[in-house]
Image: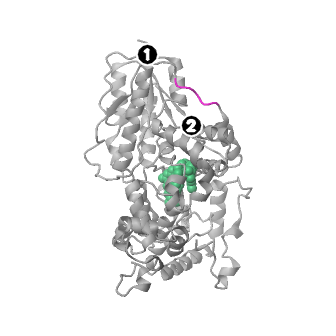
Amino acid sequence: MPALQIVWFKRDLRMHDHRPLHQAAERGPVLPLYVIEPELWQQPDCSERQWLFCRESLVDLRQALAALGQPLVVRRGDVVEVFERARSQFELEAIWSHEETGNDWTFRRDKRVAAWARRHGIAWFELPQFGVIRRLQSRNGWARRWETQMAEPVVMSPPGLPALVRVDPGLIPERPCEELASDPCPQRQPGGRSMALLELGDFLENRAARYSGSISSPNTAFSGCSRLSAYLAWGCVSMREVIQSSRRHSGRGVSSFESRLHWHCHFIQKLEDQPAIEFSDFHPFMRGIRELNSSRLEAWAQGWTGVPFVDACMRALNAHGWINFRMRAMLMSFASYHLWLPWRDSGLHLARQFVDYEPGIHWSQCQMQSGSTSINTIRIYNPIKQGMDHDADGVFIRRWCPELADLPTAHIHEPWRHIADHPEPIVNCAEAARLAKDRIWAIRRSAGFDQHADAIQKRHGSRKAGLQPTVSKRRRKPAAQKSGVQQLSLEL
Ligand SMILES: Cc1cc2nc3c(=O)[nH]c(=O)nc-3n(C[C@H](O)[C@H](O)[C@H](O)COP(=O)(O)OP(=O)(O)OC[C@H]3O[C@@H](n4cnc5c(N)ncnc54)[C@H](O)[C@@H]3O)c2cc1C
């Protein structure tokens, strides 16, 4: 048999527009491989709901590859040991995969794989997965390069894959490892490319026109948003496919949808450029300013803070594995400002809850909603106002907080203010927000803050809106706020 090409699937569970598969198949017989890594699934940002989505996507991919002639081969264990076993059985020419901008664990694992491949003279070809650029020198021109990549033709799946003799495809187990905690998520989206294509088609045909008007309220967002994030995070569809399908539609709503697809890669680029932001604040002056408070963290994570809209959003997220952007931002802001919790701890809870967990977007957003990036306006979401604006009649609150179901609408957003003996929330929202704002502004005004912020802007800031790389004055406290007038931009 000629030397084998291993196509190593990670978070790219499709065969359409899969350049590594396409190019490997042109070179020779392919071993399409997914390795279930028990140690990965024991990392604190992984959860059973993510695994189940991944599992469904693996089943789907196995069927699709089998139709080409060679089903997906699944093995469990350390990936270097799996490659080593393959090397003892076959002559290996190359490993093909997409570049992964993952968590610290996958980063270190990839370094081990690279060292192993070098040691044995086996080439490892890693091709870009999204519009993220590895070893990027400067953010200037990034958006243009992203556009060029997205405009490249989608590659077809190979016409056929020669079947490998005496290679057992292996079982896709129910669980990746014993240690993974059970994590019921009754309303989770199902995984797999077939489901991804249904969601994409339905969004573009039927929902895109009302996209902009329905993304803010959790009453409309579950059906109004594209709901493609998990399919993009697990690679069931490629970013290029989504962009190109969307452009073929060119109906109402698609331009704001497309700008978000651009953000997807913009945020992942930050983690690609600076992997430390998974653990460490962008701005050095923000490091270590918050303390862990386990009982506050637990109340927030379980949806028992006593603030009805916050609790309803968290419980909905826990049951669906998804919630819309505005509500994610509000939950994070509440944890970081009102509860003054370190973003890494609250961010880990959210990461596990999100079926669409994407480290690059997630950690950048967690920091942004906690004021740690220093290049964005501070946004302290007022959770009472958010509830009044986006769930005026309390429909969402009543659905997710049945203990409040009988309250009249006039009382539902702040029941403790209207009903004698109703428990107070775990913090006084107005006071906690004021204190947090003062603390953050005190740091922002301190000597030397702007120099670091300018460097962060230069390295990570978007140039798309025509911003100059360094704009210190955007970080200064607005005049109206100095005179005590509440700033809408600060209290969203
Ligand atoms: C604290 C916090 C954590 C987040 N963590 C994640 C995460 O782990 N994974 C993730 O995919 N998104 C994350 N987001 C971004 C955003 O909330 C989700 O992408 C979006 O809600 C997914 O729903 P959708 O697919 O229906 O999005 P749509 O509104 O339909 O947008 C289409 C696509 O654009 C991308 N996108 C949308 N909004 C953003 C954004 N603000 N930043 C970057 N990309 C965006 C996503 O890929 C999304 O699927 C996070 C946001 C916050 C505030």
Residue at 62% from the left image edge and 80% from the top image edge:
486
Secondary structure mostly seen in magenta is loop
Residue 439 position by quadrant? bottom right
Rounded to the nearest whole Å, what is the CA distance between mark 1 and mark 2? 26 Å
The circle on residue 128 is 2
Q: Which residue is disc 1 drawn over?
A: 162
The answer to whether 336 is drawn above or below residue 484 in the figure is above
On-image quarter of the C terminus: bottom right
**Disc 1 residue: CB within 8 Å of ligand 1:** no
Residue at 54% from the left image edge and 64% from the top image edge:
369
Secondary structure under tag 2 reads loop
The mark lying in front, picked from 1 and 2, is: 1
The answer to whether 27 is drawn above or below residue 199 in the figure is above
Amino acid carrying mark 2 in the image: Pro
Residue 235 horizontal side relative to residue 399, left or right: right
- Seen from this angle, which residue lies furthest bottom? 420
Residue 330 horizontal side relative to residue 463, left or right: left
Residue 162 position by quadrant? top left
Q: Foreground residue, 326 or 206?
A: 206
Residue 316 horizontal side relative to residue 209, left or right: left
| Magenta-drawn stretch contains 255 | no
- Seen from this angle, which residue lies furthest left? 178
Residue at 35% from the left image edge and 24% from the top image edge:
86
Region rendered in magenta:
153-157
* Among numbered discs 1 and 2, the one appearing first in the sequence: 2
